[in-house]
Image (cartoon, rainbow, N blue to C red):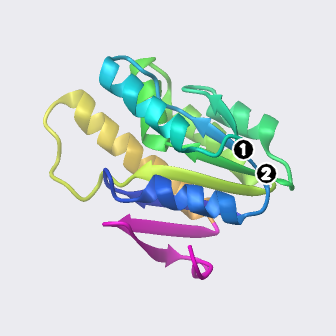
Amino acid sequence: MIRLILGGARSGKSRLAEQLARASGREVTYIATAQAHDDEMQARIQRHRDERPAHWQTLEEPLALAATLLARQAPEHCLLIDCLTLWTTNQLLAGADMAAEREALCAALQNARGEILLVSNETGMGVVPMGELSRRFSDEAGWLNQAVAALADQVVLTVAGIPLVIKGPPLEPGV
């Protein structure tokens, strides 16, 4: 099953993804896309590491997400990718062809096996950003979310820690 979990900053989307990964009963691989370019981000990444179960495998992959997904997916695995918007930022800053990267990720998802949980920020509910790079980021994140949502079996929007299923089956009780 492919699940896309959307929400704003501090909406509870990562916590929900981790709950779903635990509940899957599968071997979990956490694929982190963040890069620590400053002390605050390093502390944030460390806090996330400390909060994850020790038996989960963690891969830090800021760019090669499609290849990592293809290499790691399996029926008995749960892949938790956190998060697509940081991955988008990394791609933009690296000068990548976002359309090609989005296509590659979607192709990998179309053939995915096992449980795939993707976390992403919903950037389309605010004002149009000022600045060319900010607008491009918002556009790219929105197009990526739409493409992944079209492939996903379930899409969940988290608001103030409350999950709202907007596509697919309801969440399991207790999640």
Q: Secondary structure at mark 2?
A: loop
Residue shown at 39% from the left, 41% from the top: 140
Q: Are marks 2 and 1 in contact (CB under 8 Å)?
A: yes
Residue 19 higher or lower than 121, as above or below: below
Q: Secondary structure at mark 1?
A: helix
Q: Does residue 146 appear in the picture of this structure? A: no
Kindly identify the amino acid type of the residue bearing the numbered disc 2: Asn
Mark 2 to mark 1 CA distance (whole Å): 6 Å
Residue shown at 60% from the left, 82% from the top: 173
The location of residue 141, given as percent across then percent down, is: 40, 44
Is residue 46 left or right of 66 when viewed as pictured?
left
Q: Does residue 72 appear in the picture of this structure? A: yes
Q: Residues within 10 Å of mark 2 (few under 14, many from 20)?
A: few
Residue 7 in the magenta stretch? The answer is no
Q: Which residue is mark 2?
A: 111
Q: Residues within 10 Å of mark 1 (few under 14, many from 20)?
A: some
Residue shown at 45% from the left, 17% from the top: 94
Q: Quadrant of the C terminus?
A: bottom right
Residue shown at 51% from the left, 61% from the top: 16
The location of residue 31, given as percent across then percent down, is: 62, 37
Is residue 69 left or right of 94 when viewed as pictured?
right
Q: Which residues are magenta?
A: 153-175
The location of residue 87, given as percent across then percent down, is: 49, 34
For residue 108, the mark is 1
Residue 77 higher or lower than 48, as above or below: below
| Nearer to the camera, 167 or 156 | 156
